[in-house]
Amino acid sequence: MAEVLVLVDHVDGAVRKPTLELLTLARRIGDPVAVALGAGAEATASVLGEHGAVKVLTSDAPEFADYLVVPKVDALQAAFETVSPAAVLVVSSAEGKEIAARLALRIGSGIITDATDLEAGDEGPVATQAVFAASFTTKSRVSKGVPVITVKPNSAPVEPAAAAGTVEALTVSFGESATGTKVTSRTPRESTGRPELTEAAIVVSGGRGVNGAENFPLIEALADSLGAAVGASRAAVDAGWYPHTSQVGQTGKSVSPQLYIASGISGAIQHRAGMQTSKTIVAINKDAEAPIFELVDYGVIGDLFAVVPQLTEEINTRKG
């Protein structure tokens, strides 16, 4: 069976969930070969092998930490030339999409971004995408070269499948542009204890209807009762009520959780573009004509200041 390259997203050897989802998808079209880069790369091998990676190509060169993006592109290109894969899969993050685009350009191949599903086809992998602000679903394939595909988190289940996970050192020759942009300092992000927004299985978001930063603890309390991430609409972010890093929408982050709860969000097309592929959508809004109700699975017409605390209390009671 043809091999499929999977770029590993990890932190010091701890593999992040979207990579394990990529391995599930990769097994549909071939034998996954993982590419782990940076500090702790070799430590990823056992987990990757447990989830279907037949081989793990590793490199822990300091360039991956000291410089931005390009060293990883150089490494992924080296892996591509070593393996001659049937496809290359990357997590659909901001960095992942830049790496994928640069690789596709270098190898003269087509690219598909933000795929939500992947299946084998007679003429190569077929990717499912949500397009035009998630108003339509399309199926497409790359018609030139080896497909480079980025996949949204939460697009596939994590399915263990034991494989060899053989570790092999990857030899990488870095080009001149690899050292063009240097990382001069890092500041650890303050942890909230909540899941990463783009990877969370449940997201609770607040919008203009929250009516102030002082009221966002209502949204946070509901999120915490569910073990969820907290999101915000652009209106809430622009008003300074919540950090920009939590913005969901066309100009923010794109999420695709199992459950999305929108509180006090009208449902402008820009917001819908970032969350419409969620598996189940619940909206709480006192305006019965709000556009958000056009796409929800469950809608609650009511004042969020009454509904959200009751919902939080009920969830905590059932958990207790």
Image: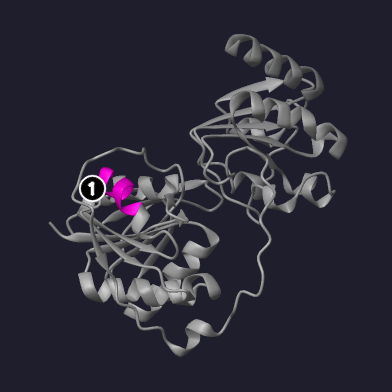
Camera-side residue of 108 and 46:
46
Q: Does dot 1 land on a helix, a strand or a loop?
A: helix
Pick the front one: 55 or 136: 55
Q: Which quadrant does the N terminus fall into?
A: bottom left
Here the colouring is one colour
Q: Position of residue 277 (x, y in %)?
A: 50, 41
Residue 319, quarter of picture: top right
Decide: is 167 above or below 268: below
Q: Quadrant of the C terminus?
A: top right
Label 1 neighbourhood size at 10 Å, few (<14), some (14-19), many (20+)? some
Residue in the foreground of this view, choosing between 293 and 319: 319
Q: Is residue 8 above or below residue 298?
A: below
The residue that appears at 62% across and 37% down in the rendered structure is 194
Q: Is residue 129 visible?
A: yes
Question: x, y (%) of residue 126?
Answer: 29, 54
Residue 144 visible within the image? no
Residue bearing mark 1: 28
Farthest-out residue, bottom? 176
Residue stretch rendered in magenta on the structure: 44-51
